[in-house]
Image: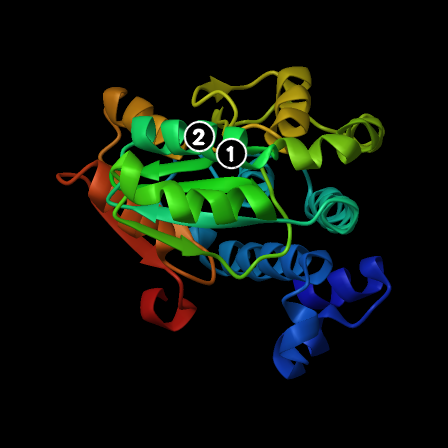
Amino acid sequence: MFCDRADAQLGYPLTRLCFEGPEAELNLTTFTQPAVFVVAMAMWQALKATLPQPAFVAGHSLGEFMALVVAGALDFETGLHLVAERGRLMSRAGEAASGGMAVLLAATLEAADALCTAATEASGQPLAVANDNCPGQVVISGALAALEAATALAPAHNVRRIQRLPVSVAPHSVLMAGVQAEFAQFLATVPLRAPQIPVVLNATAAPETDAEAIRQALVRQLTSPVRWRESLLWMAAQGVDHFIEIGPRDVLTGMVKRTLPTARAEAVDKIAFWA
């Protein structure tokens, strides 16, 4: 059902692209983001009757739009419309200023910040923390020259391992600033309701139920870091001890386990395993 609705709304065969490829085309930001969104929403629709009522919802980067649908702030079509536009604008920003991302393993947030500052100074190009995922895993994002400088400077900043990610854009960095105003204008035209469930936002690591504040945070999200570790810690401080991840992979479940070792975390990444 969601697949047919997505194909009709987008005006291209997203379903066929997901199942038949080509993979190189599916991996383009313009198509990847709507594809992940539709798959996650289809899983949610199939499973929601069997899942417990959440106290809070949260999504990592693109996942924040899915969380907003689950919370009732967006309907499926509006969420897909936003995700598709976000992907298009991010792709355009990448064409205007080539960038990338890298994950720092066994690195503290403080070490990552220091490395980004040093690499920015050495290269003259921007680099910053993009995702504070969990203890020992920080993702940085920025210009290619700055990423190369960071690789060379990593040992001097107590970063034992730096691994480039297979992306050609630099989300959650200043390189997205060129499309931020256009995304804000687009976002201002779409209906956004107050969520029925508080949404813990990437940009603030705090819950929000005000529609206008959420709208502003979604615009900020393009250039600001995903404060995922802080978001998990905040929810745990409210007594949350059970986290359920819905989507095509189980990456976030691992982040929960590393941040909150005593919490119960499970991924519903295959419908047949849950139903």
* Percent of width and height locating residue 59: 48, 40
Mark 1 neighbour class, 10 Å CA radius: few under 14, some 14 to 19, many 20 or more: some
Judging from the image, what secondary structure is the residue with disc 1 in? Answer: helix
Mark 1 and mark 2 in contact (Cβ < 8 Å)? Answer: yes
Instruction: Say above or below: 160 vs 1.
Output: above
Q: Compared with residue 100, is residue 10 higher up or lower down, i.e. above or below?
A: below
User: Mark 1 highlights which residue?
Assistant: 122
Label 2: few (<14), some or many (≥20) within 10 Å? some
- Name the quadrant of the C terminus: bottom left
* Residue nearer the viewer, 226 or 52: 226
- Colouring used for the render: rainbow
Task: Provide the secondary structure element on which disc 2 rests.
Answer: helix
Q: CA distance from mark 2 to mark 1?
A: 6 Å
On the image, which quarter does residue 234 sit in? Answer: top left
Q: Which mark is residue 118?
A: 2
Q: Give how far across and how far down residue 165 sits, in percent.
A: 48, 57
Is residue 73 among what the camera can see? no
Figure quadrant of the N terminus = bottom right
Q: Quadrant of residue 137?
A: top left
Q: What residue do we see at 39% from left, 33% from top?
A: 115
Residue closest to the eye, 255 or 154: 154
Above or below for 169 versus 223: below
Q: 173 or 241: nearer the eye?
A: 173
The residue type indicated by label 2 comes to Ala
Identify which residue is drawn at 36% across, 58% down. 250
Front position in the image: 26 or 187: 26
In this view, the residue farthest toward the left is 262
Tell me what residue is drawn at x 59 percent, y 48 percent. 144
